[in-house]
């Protein structure tokens, strides 16, 4: 089976494709090549540039901005020295570190992950994890459901553990 194209693999001239001039503004924002501002380093950074992040009141030093719901796409920032007490979620989540360094202890698996710029981590649904931030850190995180956080310890216990 050859898919949607005809046997001669020709394409109607009315279809411009993703990289045609007609669609250029839509693809260039993430390609990075059209950005005149050198401070924009990546597509995710472009999404959050000049956006105000809202404080995460239940975890000191944290702030976040939800960019989209279902799936939920969020930018999160934590200040150096911040600690997230052991907690879990009713969803698994993917994250990519955009700036900074942090360690994630997956207490369910008894594993530690040291993450820096460009690193990716998937945390499965229900896995209890604790986090410490060694630098001001910003990351992109994605999950399928409405945000929740269920704590297994208090902040003082978490600080003593890391």
Image (spheres, rainbow, N blue to C red):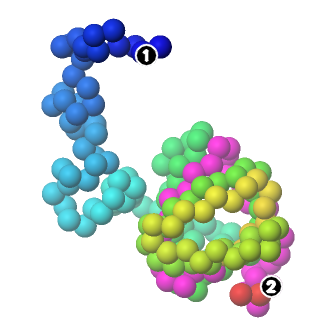
User: Left or right: where does residue 49 sit relative to residue 150?
Assistant: left
Position of residue 17 relative to residue 99, above or below, is above
Disc 1 element: loop
The residue located at (53%, 54%) in the rendering is 74
Task: Report the mark closest to the observer, 2 or 1.
Answer: 1
Image coords of residue 7 (percent x, y): 33, 9
Q: Does residue 156 appear in this view? A: no
Quadrant in the picture for residue 85: bottom right
Position of residue 96 relative to residue 59, above or below, is above
Position of residue 93 relative to residue 118, above or below, is above
Image coords of residue 57 (percent x, y): 64, 68
Q: Please state the extent of the stretch shown in magenta in the rendering.
A: 132-160
Furthest-bottom residue in this view: 160
Image coords of residue 142 (percent x, y): 57, 51
Quadrant in the picture for residue 155: bottom right
Quadrant for the C terminus in the image: bottom right
The residue located at (80%, 74%) in the rendering is 110
Disc 2 element: helix
Quadrant in the picture for residue 16: top left
Q: Earlier in the sequence, mark 2 or mark 1?
A: 1
The circle drawn on residue 157 is 2
Q: Is residue 134 magenta?
A: yes
Answer yes or no: do the residues labelled 2 and 1 have beta carbons within 8 Å? no
Q: Which residue is mark 1?
A: 3
The residue located at (73%, 55%) in the rendering is 124
């Amino acid at each position: 089976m050859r898919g949607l194209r005809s046997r001669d693999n020709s394409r109607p001239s009315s279809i411009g494709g993703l990289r045609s001039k007609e669609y250029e503004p839509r693809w260039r924002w993430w390609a990075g090549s059209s950005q005149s501002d050198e401070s924009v380093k990546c597509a995710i950074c472009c999404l959050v540039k000049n956006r105000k992040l809202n404080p995460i009141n239940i975890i000191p030093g944290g702030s976040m901005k939800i960019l989209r719901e279902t799936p939920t796409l969020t930018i999160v920032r934590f200040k150096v020295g911040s600690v997230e007490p052991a907690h879990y979620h009713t969803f698994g989540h993917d994250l990519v570190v955009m700036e900074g360094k942090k360690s994630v202890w997956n207490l369910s698996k008894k594993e530690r992950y040291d993450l820096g710029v460009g690193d990716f981590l998937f945390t499965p649904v229900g896995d209890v994890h604790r986090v410490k931030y060694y630098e001001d850190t910003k990351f992109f995180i994605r999950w399928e459901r409405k945000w929740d956080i269920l704590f297994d310890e208090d902040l003082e216990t978490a600080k003593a553990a890391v």
